[in-house]
Amino acid sequence: MKKTPFFSRFGKSEASVAWLFMTPGLILLALFVFWPIIYSVPLALTNYSVIGKTEFVGFDNFVKALQDKSFITSLVNSLLYVIVVPFIQIFSILMAILVNSNVKGIKIFRTAYYIPVVTSMVAVALIWGWLLNQNGVINYVLSSVGLMQEKITWLSNKDTALWTLMFITMWKGLGYYMMIYLAGLQSIPKDLVEAAMIDGANRAQTIRKITIPLLKPYVFFCTLISLMAAIRVFDEVFILTMGGPGDATLTSSLYIYQQGFQQFNFGYSSALGLIVSVMIAALSIVIFRFNRKGGVNPY
Amino acid sequence: MRKKPLRVLKLIALYAALILFAIFMMGPFLWILSVSLMPGKNVFSSPPAIFPTFIDFDNYVQVWNYMDFPRYLMNTVIIALMGVVMNIFFSCLTAYPLAVFRFKGRDLIFALLVATMIIPAAAGMVVNYLTVKALGLMGGFLAVVLPSAVTVFNVFLMRQAFMGMPHELRDSGKVDGASEFRIWLQLSLPIVKPAIAVIGLLEFMGMWNSFLWPMIVLNDTKQYPIASALSFLNGQFSYNFGWIAAGTVISVIPIIVVFLCTQKYYMEGVSGAVKG
C-alpha cells in the first residue's frame, strides 16, 4: 500500500471512499435542497391545488403572475425593503467602532448588543408590536418629549407599516453585523496605523486610507448577507402585519407562502417562487460581477 | 498636561454612547420583564408602566398552569438536539472529502452546492411539504428536523475547517495503516472541534427559534416547540398581556443562558465565518 505510486494513490479508490463519505449528506441535500428547485418547474406549469383535477396549464401561471397586482406590489415591497441595508451597515459599523475600544466592561456591552440576535423573532416581534402600538410606550415617550403631535399607529398605517418593520429587522440584526465588523476592525494591524501616524498622517487620513480599504471585504460580506435577508424577509411580516394594512407590507416571500399554504394553489405558488428565485439569482450575479475587481471572497 | 481632562471627557462620551445603545438594544427586553412581573397592568395604559412598581409572579404561575411549558421546552430541546446531532454528523461526513480528497467532480459538486445558497428558501417550502408528506413523516419531529438536517452553509464551514488541517496528518494515519474512516474519526475530527462547536451552537439557536415550519408539519399543538407555542399563545390570548409577557420571558431565557455560557465559541464562529 505504502509503495503505490502517487497517481493510483489518488485514483479510483480515493474517489469511491469520497463518495461513500458524501452519500448520506448528498441524499438529504438532493431531497430537500435540489429537489424543490427541480420539481417546482413542472409544478409551476400545472394548476395543482387541493381541489380539482391537476392539469397542465403551460405558462398560464406566469402570465397570471405578471397581471397579479398583489404579486407586483409584493415585489416592489421586497425591493423597497432593501433600503434597510445601508442603515444596517452604518449603525453596525458605528457600534463596532464603539465596542472596539478597550475600556472596562466592554465585553458586557458587546454581549448586550448581541442578545436580540439570539432571541426568536416571535418574541422580538411581540415585544415591538406592543411598544409600537398606538397607545404604546414609544408613542408616549415621543409625545411627552414633544417630538410628536399626533399618535402614530406605526404598524397599522399604510404609510409607516413597512418602514416600521424595516426598523425591527434592523434592530434585531445589528448585533450580528457588529460582531463581523468588530472582527474586521481587530484584524487591522495596529502597527500599520501607528506607522502611518508617525509618517505624519492624521486620524481622518488613517481612517480613509487604511481602515476603510481593509474593512471592505467585511462591508461586502455584510451587505450581501443583509441584502439577501431583506429580499427574503418573512418572519417579522408574518407575525406582525400579515402583509397588511391592505397590501402595504406584503413581501414576495409572504405572498408565495400565502398562495401555497393559505390558498393551497401549489402550482401558482411554485411559479411565483421561480420568478423570485430567478430575480434574486440575477441580482447576485450582478453583485458578484461588480465585486470581482476587488477580488474578495465573501465566505 | 492638557491632555488629561480631554481623555476623561472622551471616556465619558464613550460610555454615554455605549449606554445609549445598550438601552436601545436591551430596553425592550427589560420592559417585557417588567410587564411580566406586574399582573393586571395594562401595557397600553397612560402613562405606560415602564418600570415595575411592584413585583408579583402571578403571571408566571398562571401561564405555567395553563400552558404545558415543561412539555414545550422538552419538545424544543429534543428537536434542537436532533438538529444539532444530524447537522454535525452529516456536514462533517460530506465536507471531509470535499476538503482533503482529490477526485473527479469534486469542484463541480462544491460549485453546485454553493449555487443553491442564493436561491430563496420560501420557494422550496411547498415542495418540501409535499416531500415530507410523501415520506409519511407528517406530525413527527423528524418532519421538523429532516429538511434542515444538513445545510449547505454548515458543509461550507466544515470544509473550511478541514482545509486548515495539516496534510501530514492524513499521511501519517495512512502509514500506520488506518482506514480512511478511522483517520476521519480519530485524527481529523478532534482537530476541527471548534468548528463543530460553532455549527452545533448555530444550529441549536436556529432550531430553538424556528416557529413556522414546525407549525406547518406538526398537527398537534402539544408537539410544538416553544417559539411556535408562543405564537399560538399570542393568537389565543392577545388580550392577556401579563400571560404573554411571562410566556415570552420563559421562552427567551433558556436561549439567552445558552448564549451567555457559550458566547466565546459562538462569537469566534460568527467572525470566523467571514475570514475563511
Image (cartoon, coloured by chain):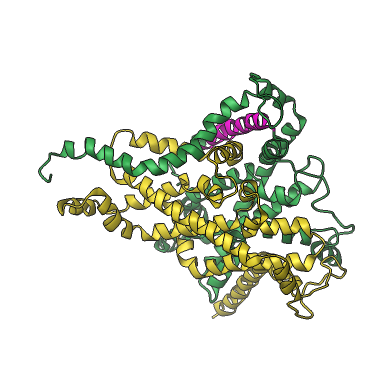
Q: Is residue A70 above or below residue A182?
A: above
**Which is nearer the eye, A262 or A174?**
A262
Residue A265: x and y in percent read 69, 32
Q: Is residue A252 above or below residue A188?
A: above
Visible residue check, residue A294 = no
Q: Which residues are magenta?
A: A265-288
Q: Residue at x 54, y 62 (%)?
A: B77
Drawn side of residue B78 relative to residue B50, left or right: left
Residue B272: x and y in percent read 44, 56
**Which is nearer the eye, B42 or A114?**
B42
As drawn, the residue found furthest toward the front would be: B136
Drawn side of residue A43 relative to residue B59, left or right: left
Viewport quadrant of the N terminus of chain A: top left
Magenta stretch: dominant SS? Answer: helix
Residue B128: x and y in percent read 56, 39
**Which is nearer the eye, A19 or B256?**
A19
Q: Residue at x 58, y 40 (%)?
A: B133
Residue A5: x and y in percent read 12, 39
Drawn side of residue A133 relative to residue B125, left or right: right
Q: Residue at x 85, y 62 (%)?
A: A135
Q: Quadrant of residue A119?
A: bottom right
Q: Quadrant of residue B79?
A: bottom right
Visible residue check, residue A146 = yes
As drawn, the residue found furthest toward the right would be: A150
Magenta span contains residue A82? no
Chain B: what color? yellow
Drawn side of residue A235 relative to residue B239, left or right: left
Chain in green in the render: A
Q: How many marks?
A: 0
